[in-house]
Image (cartoon, rainbow, N blue to C red):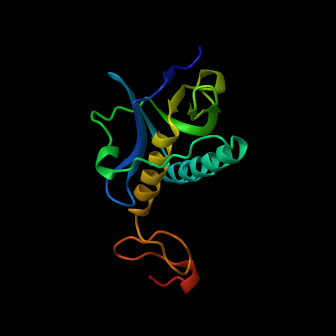
Amino acid sequence: MPGQVYELNPASHITTGAVGQPGQRVFYLQALQGAETVTLIVEKLQVEALAQSILQMVEELYEKFPDLARVEADYRAERMTLKKPIDPAFRVGQLGLGYDADRDLIVLVAQEVTTEQRGPEEAGVARLFATRTQMLALAEHGRAIVRQGRPICGLCGQPMDPAGHFCPRSNGHKH
């Protein structure tokens, strides 16, 4: 049986956020269109990669479409909060971006993580269409959310808990 398909075309609001303490946060991607809300669980690395991909894609659009008007992110952190209730539809396995040149919208396609019991043909899919301005704000906010996590060890590059961490580069001593 095919998985659930969610399509917000276009989304009136799109954001990402995290709930919980650093080191134990759960990350979400959320979009709204009217009364419909689609919330998905994502990984921190997916949020970071999505932000970078959006920024890269927008620059590539300016190269490919030289007459395309430049836009800025309408980013204000207080407007980017997750809307409650946070009721995720699924956990994201893959994210992809596309561009609808006729309507000047970027589409974010999220596919549910697959398992042996639930193959790709049964995975849920969300297609979230948004303006370049909205996507740039999503990218800025995603980067800010990721930076709010645990500090990174200067020796090994791993996150450090408040009590320190086991650092393999310091011969096993806490750092």
**Quarter placement of the N terminus:** top right
Q: Is residue 152 above or below residue 78?
A: below
Horizontally, is 87 left or right of 174 in the view? left
Q: Residue 37, can we see it?
A: no
Horizontally, is 41 left or right of 97 in the view? left
Q: Which residue is at a point 34% across and 45% down the rendered structure image? A: 80
Q: Quadrant of residue 169?
A: bottom right
Outermost residue on the right side: it is 64
Q: Which residue is at a point 66% across and 43% down the rendered structure image? A: 61
Q: Is residue 58 above or below residue 92?
A: below
Q: Residue 2, can we see it?
A: yes
Give the percent coordinates (x, y) of residue 121.
65, 22
Q: Is residue 83 above or below residue 62?
A: above
Q: Is residue 115 above or below residue 66?
A: above
Q: Which residue is at a point 72% across and 43% down the rendered structure image? A: 64
Along the line of sight, the residue nearer the viewer: 38 or 114: 38
